């Protein structure tokens, strides 16, 4: 099982859309996939369910989120409290025991089933409370404090626990565009990181920001690993912060003779991305990739426009283009799997 994060410091680059469709095509290819929505904006959650379904999940667990497990257990009927663990819960609910500093629960609430091979655990707006706890306990990790280490590694641990139970091949984590504490621990404790980009100035600066953050985070975790015990070290990945590559996503195509069929303004920025990565993404976090992988985007991803029910008649008249889109996602997924395989090379 591999835990993958798809992240960019810039919003609006198609990060959530790419995560959703990559997970679906991997599932169609026979891989078993779990998506963890760790973005409090909840866009991924709303891709997978109706708004009223998500609201009911929130409403049922509000007492725990607002008051904590002990208070909620006293306020609720015993059976109602037990039933909380028999239906889908949000990521914040799953992290709440660590946030409170109490024992973790034994039963894993079931994820939402999207397809035969694809499941989802939704998010909620209150995730900032967990992020605040990370900030409060961060320094304690360097002292080997058990609760601090649990707080930093709990998201990875949940991915492992769900994978042990449901036999996932991939856990893909959708994140916000922030370089704050929550994404710091997500990106530093997953097995690999992929960056979707738009071919524009903001993406180049985003890559620069990400590169600077990755260097700092890697230094901090390397310092921590020299201090904490071998048993605690096992809670973290063997190699924190591993870069898988980039993709140019939702770019405007233009039939031309240039190699990527992009409008000239987009092409100018797109061609700067590989060099920007080489300069700002430390070689240590991409050493498992070949030079060609670093220089070449995971490219075969089409543009995507979300479809409303009223647009369904349009789909039937353009079935060939939608089938072509599926084929391109399959090509993308094949390249993605090739890159993920490099994580085991060391």
Image (spheres, grey):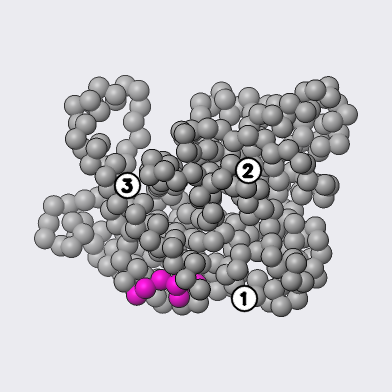
Measure how far apart labels 2 and 1 are at the Cα level. 33 Å
Task: Estimate how packed mark 2 is, as few (under 14), some (14 to 19) or many (20 or more) residues with alpha carbons within 10 Å.
Answer: few
Quadrant for residue 110, please give it.
top right
Residue extent of the magenta highlight? 285-291
Quadrant for residue 299, please give it.
bottom left
Residue 105 lies, in percent from the top left, at 77, 41
Mark 1 and mark 2 in contact (Cβ < 8 Å)?
Answer: no
Q: Mark 2, mark 1: which one is toward the viewer?
A: 2
Q: Which residue is mark 3?
A: 329
Q: Which residue is mark 1?
A: 219
Q: Residue at x 11, y 60 (%)?
A: 257
Q: Is residue 265 visible?
A: no
Residue 220 lies, in percent from the top left, at 65, 73
Q: Which dot marks residue 67? A: none
Q: Mark 3, mark 1: which one is toward the viewer?
A: 3
**Reading the chain from its start, which is encountered first: label 3 or label 2?**
2
Measure how far apart labels 3 and 1 are at the Cα level. 35 Å
Left or right placement of residue 103 versus residue 60 in this view: right
Considering the numbered disc 1 on the image, is that residue within a helix, a strand or a loop?
Answer: helix
Left or right placement of residue 75 versus residue 337 in this view: right
């Amino acid at each position: 099982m591999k835990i993958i994060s798809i992240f960019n410091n810039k919003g609006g680059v198609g990060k959530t859309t790419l995560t959703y469709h990559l997970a679906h095509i991997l599932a169609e290819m026979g891989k078993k996939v779990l998506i963890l929505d760790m973005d409090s904006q909840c866009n991924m959650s709303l891709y997978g369910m109706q708004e009223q379904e998500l609201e009911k999940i929130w409403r049922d667990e509000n007492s725990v989120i607002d008051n904590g497990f002990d208070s909620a257990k006293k306020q609720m009927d015993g059976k109602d409290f037990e039933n909380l663990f028999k239906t889908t819960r949000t990521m914040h609910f799953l992290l709440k025991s660590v946030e409170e500093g109490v024992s973790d629960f034994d039963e894993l609430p079931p994820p939402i089933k999207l397809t035969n091979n694809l499941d989802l655990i939704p998010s909620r707006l209150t995730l900032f409370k967990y992020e605040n706890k990370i900030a409060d306990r961060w320094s304690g990790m360097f002292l080997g404090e058990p609760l601090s280490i649990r707080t930093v590694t709990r998201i990875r641990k949940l991915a492992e626990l769900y994978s042990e139970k449901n036999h996932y091949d991939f856990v893909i984590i959708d994140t916000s565009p922030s370089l704050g504490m929550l994404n710091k621990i997500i990106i530093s404790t997953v097995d690999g990181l992929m960056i979707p980009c738009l071919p524009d100035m903001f993406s180049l600066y985003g890559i620069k920001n990400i590169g600077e953050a990755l260097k700092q985070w890697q230094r901090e975790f390397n310092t921590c690993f020299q201090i904490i015990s071998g048993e605690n070290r096992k809670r973290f990945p063997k190699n924190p912060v591993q870069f898988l590559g980039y993709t140019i996503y939702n770019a405007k195509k233009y039939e031309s003779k240039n190699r990527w069929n992009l409008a000239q303004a987009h092409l100018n920025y797109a061609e700067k991305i590989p060099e920007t990565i080489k300069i700002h993404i430390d070689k240590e976090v991409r050493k498992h990739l070949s030079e060609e992988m670093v220089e070449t985007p995971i490219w075969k991803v089409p543009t995507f426009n979300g479809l409303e029910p009223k647009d369904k008649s349009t789909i039937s008249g353009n079935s060939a283009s939608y089938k072509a889109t599926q084929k391109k996602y399959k090509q993308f997924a094949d390249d993605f799997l090739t890159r993920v395989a490099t994580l085991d090379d060391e």
